[in-house]
């Protein structure tokens, strides 16, 4: 039976999966600035091409952050089966975030210890990328051994810049038609959401910069100026006492994880006021001035039950309340970035196929979840117009972006198995060869 052959073939590829994951971690595709993007695409193409994948290198020319020094390279590899049918696409981002402090392992060493592979991007999401590649390779090999012609096609993409919005990656590819529904019918994004969970989508995002304005004066005579930092203090107090309790009361029917994200949230990403921080090396005192500008960046995450207009109106109303209480209060709100929430239906083909495969491989029911933060599904949904898309991958969500990030070998093996069995169902492969 094809499914037995897949299990055996995968079993034999455990070492190959480890080696591939390590090789990918050892390419430091840091974003920003966007290092080694071509190198990682080349390593993947060199592996996939000899196996019959048609490999396209796509540079997101002119996209956000694309430059001669840091070109935004993407790889789209397609394996065309012998018979016509649907295309199942696995999309992984190849970029990783900065390492930060607190590591006890080499962040780009790919060290294997006690069944875990360590490194920046191990969990998010080079482990998922490697698992999807091994899943496709095992499926193709098992079909050949069984004498079953592959129906439809398998696609693997490794894309840039997910960590900084995906504009040089999936957004660009979607604009070029790579995710149009006549070309691709099913998408699995192997982001780290845990091997027994299916992620249906994500909450929405609105980022904005809020600036309060005052008037500069001598610090010894603050009454002659207007302090923009004190203005901002009033804004922060209003956020603290009015807005945050309101957001905590807005809950959602979306199955968002973790629990704390089942409501609207707001983070203040940064605050800057007054004189700029001195250049490194300057050891003099700062000068005494009343600050005339103060800025914060807010990161508002919203629910499928809320509209973006509502989210924006809430902030405007808050600023107007502060204005009513303070003389000389001036402000500006500059929207920076917005993403609508996205959620695939629970009965979409890709959801049911992966849920069935999880039940088969792990003997348990899949849990449906929604991600607190966005990922590339937003572009596949809105630009690509493809609704049949989920995130499903081996890494543990909470380890993403942490020091000593790791991915479990057994988790990767199991989720590769799930991906291969889901492919059998989605491509409608017969489990036995036709009697000839
Ligand atoms: Zn990721």
Image (spheres, rainbow, N blue to C red):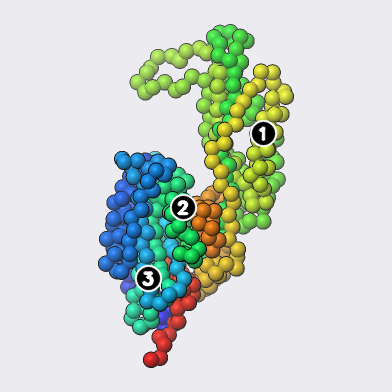
Q: Residues within 10 Å of mark 2 (few under 14, many from 20)?
A: some
Q: Quadrant of the C terminus?
A: bottom left
Against 436, residue 275 (above or below) is: above
Residue 190 rendering spot, x and y as whole percentages: 45, 60
User: Can residue 126 be seen?
Assistant: no
What's the residue at 30%, 69% (across, down)? 52
Quadrant for the N terminus, please.
bottom left
Judge: label 1 CB < 8 Å from ligand 1: no
Name the mark nearer the viewer: 2 or 1: 2
Q: Which mark is residue 211?
A: none
> Which of the 4 image quarters holds residue 296?
top right
Question: Which residue does the numbered mark 2 point to in the structure image?
Answer: 175
* Residue 204 in view: yes
* SS at circle 2: helix
Give the residue drawn at x 29%, y 55%: 42
Q: Is residue 303 above or below residue 153?
A: above
Image location of residue 129, percent across then percent down: 39, 59
- The residue pinned by badge 3 equals 80
Q: Spatial distance from mark 1 to mark 3, Cα to Cα?
A: 52 Å
Towards the viewer: 326 or 45: 45
**The residue carrying mark 3 has its beta carbon less than 8 Å from ligand 1:** no
Q: Earlier in the sequence, mark 2 or mark 1?
A: 2
Residue 316's disc number: 1
- Helix, strand or loop at label 3? It is strand
Viewer-nearest of discs 1 and 3? 3
- Could you tell me residue 350's position as x and y percent? 52, 67
Question: Is 332 placed left or right of 73 in the picture?
Answer: right
- Given residues 244 and 343, the one toward you in this image is 343
Q: Is mark 2 within 8 Å of ligand 1?
A: no
């Amino acid at each position: 039976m094809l499914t037995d052959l897949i299990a055996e073939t995968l079993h034999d590829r455990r070492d190959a999966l480890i080696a591939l994951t390590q090789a990918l971690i050892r390419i430091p595709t840091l974003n920003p600035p966007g290092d080694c993007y071509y190198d990682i695409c080349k390593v993947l193409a060199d592996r996939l091409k000899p196996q019959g994948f048609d490999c396209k290198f796509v540079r997101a020319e002119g996209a956000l952050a694309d430059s001669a020094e840091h070109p935004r390279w993407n790889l789209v590899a397609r394996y065309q089966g012998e018979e016509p049918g649907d295309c199942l696409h696995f999309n992984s981002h190849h970029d990783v975030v900065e390492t930060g402090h607190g590591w006890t392992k080499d962040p780009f060493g790919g060290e294997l210890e006690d069944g875990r592979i360590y490194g920046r991007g191990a969990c998010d999401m080079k482990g998922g990328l490697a698992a999807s590649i091994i899943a496709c390779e095992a499926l193709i090999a098992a079909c050949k051994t069984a004498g079953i012609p592959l129906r439809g096609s398998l696609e693997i993409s490794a894309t840039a810049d997910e960590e900084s919005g995906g504009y040089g990656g999936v957004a660009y590819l979607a604009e070029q038609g790579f995710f149009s529904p006549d070309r691709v019918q099913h998408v699995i994004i192997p982001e780290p959401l845990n091997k027994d969970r299916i992620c249906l989508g994500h909450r929405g995002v609105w980022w904005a910069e809020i600036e309060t304005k005052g008037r500069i004066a001598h610090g010894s005579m603050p009454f002659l100026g207007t302090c923009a930092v004190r203005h901002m203090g009033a804004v922060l107090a209003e956020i603290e006492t009015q807005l945050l309790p309101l957001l905590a009361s807005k809950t959602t029917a979306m199955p968002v994880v973790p629990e704390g994200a089942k409501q609207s949230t707001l983070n203040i990403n940064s605050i800057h006021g007054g004189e700029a921080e001195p250049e490194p090396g300057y050891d003099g005192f700062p000068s005494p001035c009343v600050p005339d500008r103060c800025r914060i960046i807010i990161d508002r995450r919203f629910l499928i039950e809320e509209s973006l207009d509502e989210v924006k109106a809430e902030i405007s109303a808050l600023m107007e309340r502060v204005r009513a209480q303070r003389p000389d209060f001036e402000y500006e709100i500059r929207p920076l970035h917005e993403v609508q929430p996205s959620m695939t239906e629970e009965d979409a083909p890709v959801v049911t196929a992966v849920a069935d495969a999880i039940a088969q491989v792990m003997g348990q029911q899949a849990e449906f979840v929604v991600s607190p933060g966005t990922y590339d599904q937003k572009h596949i949904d809105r630009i690509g117009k493809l609704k049949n898309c989920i995130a499903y991958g081996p890494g543990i969500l909470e380890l993403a972006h942490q020091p000593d990030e790791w991915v479990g070998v057994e988790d990767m093996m199991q989720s590769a198995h799930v991906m291969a069995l889901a492919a059998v169902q989605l491509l409608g492969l017969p489990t036995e060869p036709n009697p000839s």
